[in-house]
Amino acid sequence: NLGQGLSAGCGFALADRLHKRDTHIFVLMSDGEQTKGQVAEARRFAVKYGLTNITVLIDNNNIQISGRTDKVMPCRICANYRADGWEMMEVDGHNFSEIYDAIKKSIQMDSPVCIIANTVIGKGVSFMENDYRYHGKTLDEASYIKAMEELGLPPSLERYKKLREKVWQYPERKFVFTPALKKGTPVVYKKEEKTDNRTAYGKALVDIARANKDNSDFPFAVFDCDLATSVKTDLFEKEFPDNFFQVGVQEHNAATIAGAVSTDKVISFFSDFGVFGVDETYNQARLNDQNYTNLKLVCTHIGLDVGEDGKTHQCIDYIGTLRNLFGFKIVIPADPNQTDRVIRYVAGEIGNWFVGMGRSKTPVITKEDGSVYFDENYEFQYGKADIIRKGKDGYIIAMGSIVARAVKASEILKEKEISIGVINMCCPLVIDEDVMAEAMSTGLVLTVEDHHIDTGLGATVGMYLLEKKYTGKFFRKGITEYGSSGDPESLFKKEGIDADSLARFLASCK
């Protein structure tokens, strides 16, 4: 997409630096795309982090789809690059010698360089020169032959006709590598401890990096957008400042750079609030996915759990949005212990991963005997659901911070001699068929989620039950409208997904 190329170039240049390679990255751009905000974000990043190994070449023909660039949306390209600290050169874009000399000079300079190549669209063809319509308009066969005659070139249309007869396939991933990482020492938070999943994430990330600090084959890169103390990447920054990149309030740029760098054997983590890391950067995530990146996108402050920040910050569509991307895997851990194991797992996996968590402190999930559920013997497996409580009369299927509330609801109902089990389905896009079979056997299944009710966990389970011709009772609980500002528990109560509301609802189902 227009506007993302320079960010990707910054990612490749950064990867070369982390691998200590002496290389140079060239980014080819158009003049029309220079009005995109992400281009400015990338310019600033390149200067801040001294990416002297990057050169931009801009085809400056003052033409774009809708007309002349200075009429569609004027942009002071040279002034903008200079203002952000880039060195500038200007050449005749039709003079190969001038282009070569400028490129050769740019490689020797101690700052990012932008070369403006002034060109004329359709140069050498009388009826095409400076006509904006030919930015996207094809020629008919007669016009093509005339154009080739004016250029003094032999026509080769028949060759291209044959090429178009071929059925082209979407390219498969060509470079597959599994990072050889040590997972560090897993942490087991005691049941008396009440911490938040984001702190468990931050500590696990530091521990993994510490365990692999001598592994030069797979360096770490952690990206933040002015929220390090909230998303807990500040813990990493303190210990590994050279591998921490503060991108500022530039989420689009951060998402693309973090994705690009991950394609080159760099363990890349990008952390943000859910609304910024998922909703705001959806197009960047989509292109990352199409380009087979290996990004670990870890977002905090998801769902109504954000509470007082209100509806603008309550990301309630993190599953519904990312499930559209074929390559993303989603994990919503239930407590700090599971978060610790999940982070250690995804760090060593290829592909794109989203790990989501709320803001609030989360109780440690325990077994029925009171011991820690995700203990020192627990190993995370993608797609594996956990039966937290056994049930005979029905099952609650939940994820994230709702799991603890589901357990509480189960305990309330147990006192009323109603046996309701609890399943933690932390991988909401994957059905664990063995676990689901047990839930279905009771004849009552209820999904509960801190997420849009129609596009998350309930949708996944509902589709599965329909395909399996399930004939029992099935209910969904989730977010049905934009939230207001208030403490999370009161917001959950309003939606009927707090423990007491769940217990009352399930009691009424018997």
Image: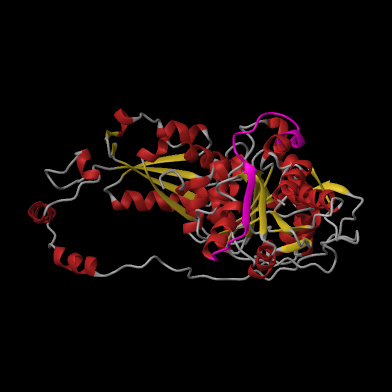
Spot occupied by residue 275 in the image (x, y as percentages of width and height):
60, 40
Spot occupied by residue 198 in the image (x, y as percentages of width and height):
75, 47
Position of residue 91 in the picture relative to residue 253 (left or right): left
383 vs 105, nearest the viewer = 383
| Quarter assignment of residue 251 | top right
Name which residue lies at 68% across and 58% down.
425
Name which residue lies at 76% across and 50% down.
406
Name which residue lies at 14% across and 54% down.
151
Which residues are the magenta region? 468-491
Q: Is residue 113 magenta?
A: no
Q: Is 212 rendered above or below residue 302?
A: below
Q: Is 101 rendered above or below residue 485?
A: below
| Quarter assignment of residue 436 | bottom right
366 vs 269, nearest the viewer = 366
Name which residue lies at 29% across and 28% down.
71
296 vs 92, nearest the viewer = 296
Position of residue 461 in the picture relative to residue 501 (left or right): left
Q: Is residue 487 magenta?
A: yes
Spot occupied by residue 19 in the image (x, y as percentages of width and height):
62, 62
Total marks drawn? 0
The reply to whether residue 52 is in sight is: no
The reply to whether residue 163 is in sight is: yes
Image coloring type: secondary structure
Spot occupied by residue 455 in the image (x, y as percentages of width and height):
55, 48
